[in-house]
Image (cartoon, grey):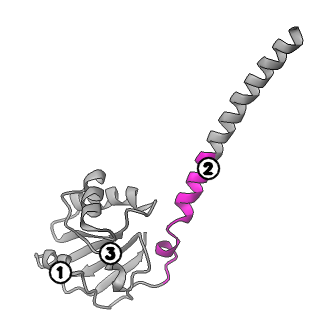
């Protein structure tokens, strides 16, 4: 009888240890997934070269007409694991940037998905356009950022 009780206790302890190990492995797989997922955007390959003129999607072209010396255009996607935290960073940049810098977002989603995305990330104050074909500006994937001067000439382009 004592051996049976010890066996049940041992099985219970091993079950708890197994559950802890499974949770730890799930967390590690999630971390790897976040690091590997946006490969297209962070490889550095592609993107508009320095000096090229960035053609903004139709909605952003109107927003960009306001007076600014520089435009920071963030290309994001709701399906990108790394884009979520970066979206908040674009909001912080917009709040801390000088008045001569405008921050604009291009979101690779439907209008409703984009509205939900910016609202959930707390950056609804930023001008954005929902354009599933947004990466036609020679942007290989999300997350990507481009800084242009007031005429739309690319100063910096790269994966973020």
Q: Is 8 above or below relative to 153?
A: above
Residue 6: quarter of image: top right
For image coordinates 30% across by 53% down, the residue present is 121
For image coordinates 24% across by 66% down, the residue present is 111
Of discs 1 and 3, which sits in the foreground?
3
Residue 21: quarter of image: top right
Magenta span dominant secondary structure: helix
Instruction: Name the N-terminal-most of marks 1 and 3.
Output: 1
Q: Secondary structure at mark 3?
A: loop
Q: Is 145 above or below relative to 16?
A: below
Please state the extent of the stretch shown in magenta in the rendering: 26-45
For image coordinates 16% across by 77% down, the residue present is 64
Instruction: Name the N-terminal-most of marks 3 and 2.
Output: 2
Q: Secondary structure at mark 1?
A: helix
Q: Identify the residue under disc 1.
A: 61
For image coordinates 49% across by 72% down, the residue present is 42
Asked whether the viewer can see residue 47, the reply is yes
Label 2: few (<14), some or many (≥20) within 10 Å? few
**C-beta proximity under 8 Å, tags 1 and 3:** no
Label 3: few (<14), some or many (≥20) within 10 Å? some
> Residue 30 in the image: x percent, y percent?
56, 52
Q: CA distance from mark 1 to mark 2?
A: 41 Å
**C-beta proximity under 8 Å, tags 1 and 2:** no
Q: CA distance from mark 3 to mark 2?
A: 31 Å
User: Is 76 placed left or right of 111 in the picture?
Assistant: right
> Residue 96 in the image: x percent, y percent?
23, 58
Asked whether the viewer can see residue 69, the reply is no
Q: Identify the residue under disc 2.
A: 28
For residue 132, which numbered disc appears in the image? 3
């Amino acid at each position: 009888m004592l051996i049976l009780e010890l066996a049940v206790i041992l099985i219970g302890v091993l079950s708890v240890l197994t559950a802890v190990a499974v949770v730890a492995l799930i967390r590690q797989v999630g971390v790897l997934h976040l690091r590997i997922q946006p490969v297209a955007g962070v490889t550095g390959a592609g993107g508009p070269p320095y000096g090229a003129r960035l053609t903004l999607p139709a909605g952003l072209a109107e927003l960009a007409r306001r007076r600014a010396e520089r435009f920071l255009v963030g290309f994001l996607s709701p399906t990108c694991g790394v884009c979520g935290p970066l979206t908040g960073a674009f909001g912080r940049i917009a709040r801390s940037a000088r008045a001569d810098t405008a921050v604009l977002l291009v979101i690779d989603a439907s209008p409703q998905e984009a509205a939900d995305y910016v609202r959930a990330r707390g950056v609804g104050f930023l001008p954005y356009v929902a354009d599933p074909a947004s990466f036609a500006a020679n942007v290989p994937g999300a997350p990507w950022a481009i800084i242009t001067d007031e005429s739309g000439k690319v100063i910096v382009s790269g994966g973020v």
